[in-house]
Structures are given as structure tokens and as C-alpha cells.
Amino acid sequence: MSRWRGVLFDKDGTLIDFNATWVPATVETARAVAALAHADPKALAEREALTVKLVGMIGYDMATRSLNPESLLARGSLGEIAALWARAAGIDAKRGAIERIGLEFRNRAVGMASPLYALDTVLGGLRARGLRLGVATMDSTQSARMTFASLKVDHLLDFVTGFDGGHGEKPGPGMVQGFCAAMGIAPSQVVVVGDSLHDMVMAKAAGAGLAVAVLSGVAGHEHLAESADHVIAGIHDLGKLLDRLAVPA
Ligand SMILES: [Mg+2]
């Protein structure tokens, strides 16, 4: 029997295409915030300048189309971004502004969610090996659940938790521990898979059996190699990696 009994995935950059999902959702939401701040429909230049500024302050440069992998956009929560944007746009005193921005952002990201791979095939293949599957994300639990339901893969996931799921935040060990408790397995039997340093640090903090970094997200090989046990291109290669590790050297 394999020593692995569960796989805990990060969501964005690991299962979901970060650039195809979060970049357009970010720019559209920033435009909506800029329109709230500059209500005059003729203030187009002001709106565009504010949009560029808002997007830039959370780590995405619209001119060069580059994302800082350690930025708020890459690893912060929507609540943090909404509060920051409301303040920067000078609309934080408006009643419900922060909640409205957070909700609009969430709904856009769910609606635009673009999977990195044929998730039903990849996740189904891992399940067929007898593995229990979970997701640990710094997005909200509800947003993650809505995303997987809209992609019709929610039935393949045994566990989904976000920053607000009661298991603490990354890079603390709580999300791995929560997955283990829910599945009745030990951390040493869990493979943690993610695209950021936070995921790898979480895996080590929890004593996970294996920390696997994927290059399908926001960070490059040089950023992840040191803290990961293995680096693979993406989750479609996870099965092959587990096969390789199962063969005694
Ligand atoms: Mg990620």
C-alpha cells in the first residue's frame, strides 16, 4: 500500500489559472472602484490612472503585465485588498464600500475561474489511486466552494478550506491539520501541492510527508526549489511523481 493517503492542493496557480482568472478579475474590479471614486462619466483619464494605481499597489503592473509573486494579489485575501483599495480611492467612508468591493471581486473571480488542466481527469485519476483530496486556499472558503461547483469538480474534493475556514492561515500548519483530522489520516501521509513559498512552509510546519511545488503559478523554479521536496511542471505530473517515489531506489 502506498504511504500516501491524501493530497492537499493550493487553489490559485495550482488548480486554477492565476493569470487567466485573477488578472482580468482584478483589472475589472479596479475599474469599478475607480468609477465609484470618479463618478463623473467624463473623468475617463482619472478613472484609468486610478485603475492602474490600484492594480499596481497590489502587485500587478498593467504596462509590463508582470506580477510580483510576493504581492498582496498573489497571496493576500480579498478583504485586505478591498480595504486597501477603498482607502486609496478615498471611498472607505462610504457605507458598505469595502464589503461591496470584496463581493464584486469575489464574484468576478468565481465567474472568470479558468482551470489549469482538465481537473476532472487529473483529480479523478488521483482519487482512483485511493487518495483523499483537499484544497487549502487563502481565498475564502465560500469563494473556493463556488469556484469548484461552477467547474463541476466539487464532487471530487473531500475537503475545502479558506483563510476563514477555522484552520488558521498559511503558512501556519492548521489547514494541513484540519485536512488530516477530517480524513482520519496523519500529516506524514499527506502530499501538499502548491505554487508558492507559503504552501511549502505550511507543509513543513505541519510535518506533511511530501511538499511538491508546481511551476504553473506565480513563482519560478529558483523561488521554490529550496523549500520543496520536489518541483514539477503542474498537477498533471503528480501521478507520475508518486509512481516514481513508490519504486524503491
Ligand atoms: Mg497559489
Image: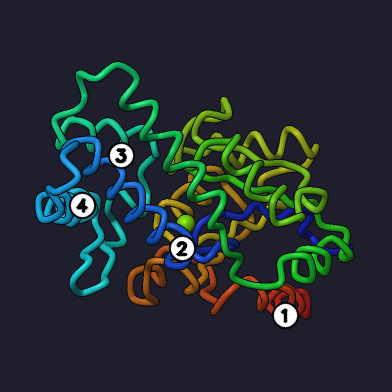
Q: Which percent across, then down, holds residue 191?
A: 65, 58
Identify the residue at image location x=57%, y=25%.
Answer: 166
Q: Which residue is mark 1?
A: 240
Mark 3–mark 2 CB contact (< 8 Å): no
What's under tag 3, amino acid-wise? Ile
Whichever of labels 3 and 2 marks the residue nearer the N terminus, that label is: 2
In the displayed structure, 211 sits above or below 178; it is: below
Mark pair 3, 2: CA separation: 16 Å
Q: Are marks 1 and 4 in contact (CB under 8 Å)?
A: no
- Name the secondary structure under disc 1: helix
Residue pointed to by mark 4: 51
Q: Which residue carries the number 2 mark?
A: 18
Classify 10 Å Cα crowding around label 3: few (below 14), some (14-19), many (20 and above).
many
Q: Going from the N terminus, do you reach mark 1 or mark 3 first?
A: 3
* Left or right of 204 on screen, residue 243: right
**110, 164: nearer the viewer:** 110
Q: Which residue is mark 3?
A: 81
Q: Nearer the viewer, residue 57 or 135?
A: 57
Number of labels in the image equals 4
User: Does any atom of ligand 1 lie closer than 8 Å to the CB of label 2?
Assistant: yes
Q: Nearer the viewer, residue 249 or 13?
A: 13
Q: Position of residue 189 (x, y in %)?
A: 72, 52
Query: In the picture shown, does residue 152 fall above or below 129?
Result: above
Assess whether mark 3 and mark 4 are in contact (beta carbons under 8 angstroms). no
Residue at image position (39%, 29%) is: 100
Which residue is painted at 28% across and 65% down in the image? Answer: 67
Q: Earlier in the sequence, mark 4 or mark 2?
A: 2
Q: Amino acid at mark 4?
A: Thr
Q: Name the image quarter holding the N terminus.
A: bottom right
Viewer-nearest of labels 4 and 2? 4
- Name the quarter where the C terminus is drawn: bottom right
What distance separates the C-alpha of mark 1 from that of mark 3?
Answer: 38 Å
